[in-house]
Image (tube, rainbow, N blue to C red):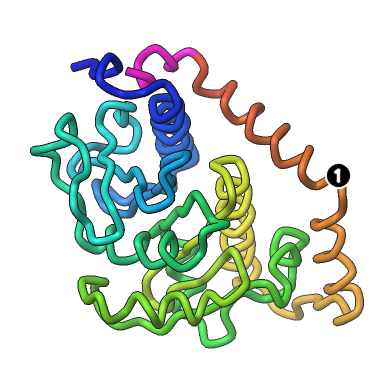
Amino acid sequence: MNQHFAINPVEWEARCQLAALYRLIAYYKMTDLIDTHISLRVPDEPHHFLINRYGVLFDHMCASDLVKIDHDGKIVENYDQGKKVNVAGFVIHSAIHHAKPHLDCVIHTHTADGIAVSAQQDGLLPISQHALKFYRRLSYHSYEGIALSLEERERLVNDLGNNKAMILRNHGLLAAGPSVAHAFHEIYFLERACQIQVKALSAHNLIYPSEALCEFTASQFEQDDAEGIIWDAWHAALSLIEKDKADFCR
């Protein structure tokens, strides 16, 4: 049912952006049935964020499927009552949203390549341009079982530190940013870096750039024109699902 009439336009636009991001994550095959999750802070409501209605496939996600909850996991609005939220999703995302007010969008995935790298002792290797985006800018969080304990939130935040991307050991990937465009850019490059690494490890005699070159390349990703590139990439990606906009923005 289209509940647009009950939601203010600013929140509705945020819901449409987040629904589009869910669809793009599905398009790039970063899904795991009904598990994993993406969240977005509600504009002008720092203590509320949107997350998926548990049980809806990402490629079916609509703006009206999203649920507005607070940092305690409570559903905020009457129009979202009755929707189910994944507890693990709440634990992971509320930790980041509560402690990092500059990170408005958080993506968590369970891709095969992401998990494969998360299970490797050395983590992400600096062997590709995609991986060098995260050189000394990537965090790690040790596995503690399914994220159902609120006590894990503090450790998640401490491990993330000042970075925007993190590998959850034996679990998956996490990426965040100040917008859906920034978070998408982070998870796309991190996922691609993991795909490259899994393929490269089937060979021998890998080439490792020097530490100086690794740092230089990472800094290139942070240059002044990076902001424009991130938004250009987001709009280009949106064109892949433009034909479905009437469906996901309802």
Q: Secondary structure at mark 1?
A: loop
Question: 89 or 42: which is nearer to us?
Answer: 42
The picture quadrant where one finds residue 18 is top left
Q: Residue at x 75, y 66 (%)?
A: 132
Amino acid residing under circle 1? Asp
Residue 90 at what x, y percent from top left? 27, 59
Magenta-highlighted residues: 243-250
Q: Residue at x 38, y 77 (%)?
A: 170
What secondary structure is the magenta-colored segment mainly? helix
Position of 232 relative to 199 (above/below) = above
Position of 152 relative to 21 (above/below) = below
Residue 163 at what x, y percent from top left? 62, 70
Question: 90 or 124: which is nearer to us?
Answer: 90
Residue 130 at what x, y percent from top left? 71, 59
Q: Is residue 112 left or right of residue 63?
A: right
> Which part of the image, by quadrant, shows the C terminus?
top left
Farthest-out residue, bottom: 121
Q: Is residue 135 left or right of residue 56?
A: right
Position of 2 relative to 161 (above/below) = above
Position of 229 relative to 156 (above/below) = above
The picture quadrant where one finds residue 203 is bottom right
Marks counted in the figure total 1
Q: Is residue 161 left or right of residue 97?
A: right
Residue holding disc 1: 225
Q: Residue at x 18, y 17 (%)?
A: 1
Instruction: Check if residue 100 falls in the magenta segment.
Output: no
Instruction: Check if residue 247 falls in the magenta segment.
Output: yes
Residue 217 at what x, y percent from top left? 85, 64
Q: Is residue 123 left or right of residue 227?
A: left
Q: Residue at x 42, y 26 (%)?
A: 16
